[in-house]
Image: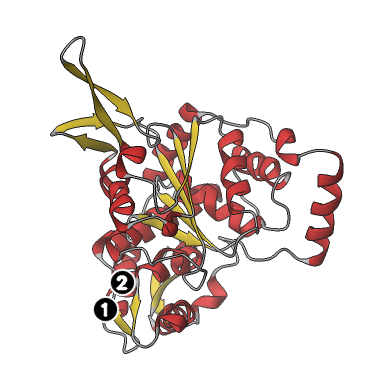
Amino acid sequence: MAQKTTSRPAAHLQSSAAEEPKQPVIRAMQAEIRKAVSGKDEVIYKVILAILAGGHILLEDMPGVGKTTLALAISRTLSLSCKRIQFTPDVLPTDVVGFNMYHKESDQFSFREGAAFCNLLLADEINRTSSKTQSALLELMEEGAVTIDGVSHTLPRLHIVIATQNPITCVGTQRLPESQLDRFLVRLSIGYPGSAAEIELLKAREAHNPMEDVRKIADADILLAMREKVNAVFVSDTLYEYVVALTNATRNHGAIRLGVSPRGSLALLQMAKASAFAQGRDFLLPDDIVFVAQDVFCHRLLMQGSAADASALAVQAVQDILDSTPLPWTD
């Protein structure tokens, strides 16, 4: 295939990446999660992509729209060991990572695991706790291990953090530091359901909890096998150049004070490869990159101007970059 550069707006390239996934396992996962979270197919799809890409997920939205429900439905669908920690101002770092307990009888210490020692950690309302406790997540999200008193303790090989947070305008919330935001592969927003989906939700809750209907579709071994296939997706040199061009554009945009780091470039590429795999391809297309760019980039940007407008400004800036950056096209 010949490749060339085009100035065609990126908004026109998302169609094939946003289609119903071709992988049967992913379609089955979506169907099960829909039982508990209706009317949010794209969010469900992107959460699955982030898990396939091996990243952590930040769900940001108003209370009561289903952030926790979505995370719990995923844990049931994948049959993962799941622990939930409700972050409040009095939660300590040791609650997350664990601590060494002294036993007087034996004059020895033993390690007591914190909530992080599981396959899926649901960190609920992460921006309501102290900065010190938030920082306790940094090492385990990046390294897959925690260090207590100089001794490293390895987390399970399959380890995912799904954190929820309310907008910073909510009472009692505080912004996560940039270093921690950068650890999340994507930031997603569920949003309010449409009228039909909300009616369906009300009817479903009359008799029983729909979460009880969510069945196991895959397990840790299947998920890890799919991750290996994601890693094996072929990326042409032209698409490597396109990813770097997008990242560089965030560092030179007038509305952006702090652009995307190299970790962000890696995140965009990995998330795009997961999109290609889900669509049944073993090679990357520009569509895959454009489809996930907003979700990967926006929370990594530090914008000029007021914090109140930062989210909307970031979305507009990334869209401007996507529309103005020449991209590869295939004949």
Q: Where is residue 190 drawn, in percent x and y?
A: 61, 61
Q: Where is residue 279 drawn, in percent x and y?
A: 56, 51
Residue sitting at x 18%, y 10%: 106
Alpha carbons under labels 1 and 2: distance apart: 7 Å
Q: Do the residues labelled 1 and 2 touch (CB within 8 Å)?
A: yes
Q: Can residue 284 be seen in this view?
A: no
Q: Where is residue 89 drawn, in percent x and y?
A: 40, 54
The amino acid at mark 1 is: Arg
The amino acid at mark 2 is: Thr
Which quadrant of the figure has residue 186?
Answer: bottom left
Q: Which of marks 1 and 2 is in front?
A: 1
Q: Which of 181 and 91 is in front in this view?
A: 91
Specify how the rendered protein is coloured: secondary structure
Kindly identify which residue carries mark 1.
251
Q: Where is residue 198 drawn, in percent x and y?
A: 79, 59
Where's the N terminus, which quadrant? bottom left
Badge 1: residue crowd in 10 Å (few <14, some 14–19, many ≥20): some
Residue sitting at x 39%, y 86%: 306
- Total tally of numbered discs in the picture: 2
Residue sitting at x 35%, y 68%: 300
Rendered view: 53 above or below 150? below
In the displayed image of the protein, which residue is found farthest to the left? Answer: 150
Residue sitting at x 44%, y 52%: 88
Which quadrant of the figure has residue 200?
Answer: bottom right
**SS at mark 2 in the image:** helix
| Residue 195 horizontal side relative to residue 267, left or right | right
Q: Which of 207 and 267 is in front in this view?
A: 207
Kindly identify which residue carries mark 2.
247
